[in-house]
Amino acid sequence: MKYKQLGRTGMFVSELCLGTMTLGGNADAGVWSSIGAVAQEEANQLIAQALAGGINFIDTADIYSFGQSERITGIALKALGVARSDIILATKTGGVMGKGPNDRGASRGHIMDSVQRSLERLQVDHIDLYQIHASDSVTPVEETLRALDDLTRQGLVRYVGVSNWAAGRLGKALGLSEALHATRFETLQAYYSIASRDIERELAPLVSEENLGLLVWSPLAGGLLSGKFGPGAPEASDARRSTFDFPPVDRGLAWQCVAEMRVIAQARSVSVSQIALAWLLARPAVTSVIIGVKRRKQLTDNLGASNITLSAEELARLDTVSALPPHYPAWMIARQEAQRYPQPAGIHAENL
């Protein structure tokens, strides 16, 4: 397992992060029952296996099974006797947690209420990375930043991040935090897969320029890139995609990616899932890839991706089959940047 610096912080996290969205999910949990229904004992085993495999980073959220995921995670860490300093614990707030109008969002009130409840469910005295789970167009960014700054000063939270934010809003927040001398967002958690590279348009460049940690959710596109789906592969009835078709993916592109990954996987005697994860781990902006599993066999397979280093030729093949179509202003910027930087031999008039 490799460990990477989390953005510009002094903290290092495993390049694979255990996601806990599959924990809980009983029949009363609505959509979460379709995502996973991992009970306590099974969760204990999964977390123990992840830690044994070198993972030191666990990501959860208050909205996952409406608090069940956090609760199960906290009980598991206690039962396993995990030292608090040995684990990087991340959770999120912002989703709908009740019927009231203030039981959601990134307002100061909801953040302050939510962090206390998450601490109680996780059975810890601080959260290493506290993330705003959704973009809230109602609450001023300044209000959110001030609340998170207070939490870090109180020691309840050590670092803060966001998830599913647009580049413009995230850039604004980074500028405001500097102007206000407030705690800065250090991470972005975003959807990214070989079949959905939209993040590379604006968010990935922003992450790199501002030295943010990039945490990837749904690296297998909700299981679509696992090799269980697509032409030549019978659809698995117990797979998440069979009951919860999310996130949205261009199926035609996904099947092209799976076909190319399958060739590489067969040549290496590994799974298609491992190739999909290895491709993400090779992306320069990526800090950690969040893996969500329901069974130990899945976790074993996912952990194996850390041992795969794709060759330059393999990466080029995968980059080509999954390439984004040209888009503005990227194609214009690329054209103008090529004219801006002189070649080793200098600038020649015919190149202008």
Image (cartoon, helix red, strand yellow):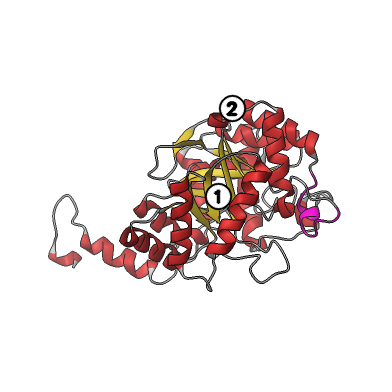
Q: Is residue 230 visible?
A: no
Rendered location of residue 190, percent (x, y): 54, 55
Residue 275 horizontal side relative to residue 168, left or right: right
Nearest to the eye among marks 1 and 2: give it: 2
Name the kind of residue labelled 1 in the image: Val
Q: Is residue 252 above or below residue 287?
A: below
Q: Quadrant of residue 274?
A: top right
Range of residues picked out in magenta: 27-37
Point 41% across, 72% down: residue = 328
Alpha-carbon neighbours of circle 1 within 10 Å: few (<14), some, or many (≥20)? many
Choose between 139 and 29: the one closer to the eye.
139
Residue 169 seen by the camera: yes
Going by the numbered disc 2, the residue's amino acid type is: Ala
In the image: residue 125, left or right of residue 238: left
Taking the image as shown, residue 64 lies to the left or right of residue 264, namely right
Question: Residue 42: x percent and y percent?
Answer: 78, 35
Residue hosting label 1: 216
Q: Which residue is mark 2?
A: 83
